[in-house]
């Protein structure tokens, strides 16, 4: 029972943080609450990924679309979320180490972006 309550608390924290991060980025916060869709938006709008390592995925617009589809590929999705997290962290004035924390411990680092006074800069 305790583990269920803990899991629900973590889910509420992460989704609440995504809601606030999306609002800070100038998007509708509700988009941050929809599972899978929020990851696509996170990569396409906020993450601005146009390359996968050294592989050019086309122009920036096409690369973003391909990057969003690659999130469905196991193990590639972890790398893409890291790249998106790096771009999001930089957009909020944070470091690459902070982005690693966003991937490994989202229940700690996402609220730090969402509920502190950091500003989003496009």
Image (tube, helix red, strand yellow):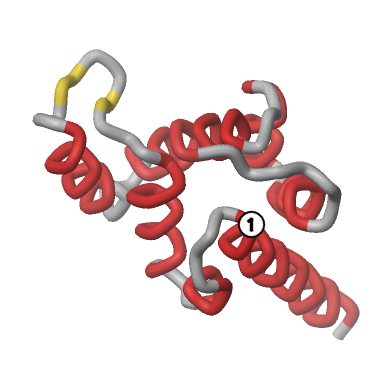
Is 16 or 7 nearer to us in this picture? 16
Quadrant where the N terminus lies?
bottom right
Is 39 or 64 nearer to us in this picture? 64
Residue carrying label 1:
24
The residue at the point 81 percent across, 74 percent down is 9
Furthest toward the bottom, the residue is 1
Q: Give the image quarter of residue 22.
A: bottom right
The residue at the point 43 percent across, 41 percent down is 47
Is 5 or 99 nearer to us in this picture? 99
The residue at the point 45 percent across, 32 percent down is 83
The residue at the point 48 percent across, 77 percent down is 34
Q: Is residue 24 above or below residue 32?
A: above
- Which element type, helix, strand or loop, lies under badge 1? helix
> Residue 104, percent across and down?
66, 40
Q: How many marks?
A: 1
> Residue 65, percent across and down?
19, 49
Q: Is residue 2 above or below residue 91?
A: below
> Residue 44, percent across and down?
33, 50
Q: Is residue 100 above or below residue 43?
A: above
Horizontal side of 50 relative to 30 (left or right) equals: left
Q: Residues within 10 Å of mark 1 (few under 14, many from 20)?
A: some
Horizontal side of 79 relative to 65 (left or right) equals: right
> Residue 46, percent across and down?
45, 47
Horizontal side of 80 relative to 104 (left or right) equals: left
Furthest toward the right, the residue is 2
Is 26 or 108 nearer to us in this picture? 26
């Amino acid at each position: 029972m305790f583990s269920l309550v803990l899991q629900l608390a973590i889910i509420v924290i992460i989704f609440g943080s995504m809601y606030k991060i999306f609002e800070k980025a100038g998007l509708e916060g509700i988009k941050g609450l929809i599972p899978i869709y929020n990851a696509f938006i996170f990569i396409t709008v906020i993450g601005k990924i146009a390359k996968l390592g050294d592989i050019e995925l086309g122009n920036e617009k096409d690369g973003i679309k391909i990057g969003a589809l690659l999130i469905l590929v196991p193990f590639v999705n972890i790398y893409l979320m890291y790249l998106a997290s790096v771009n999001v962290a930089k957009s909020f004035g944070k470091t690459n180490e902070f982005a690693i924390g966003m991937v490994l411990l989202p229940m700690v680092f996402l609220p730090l972006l969402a509920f502190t006074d950091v500003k989003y800069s496009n």
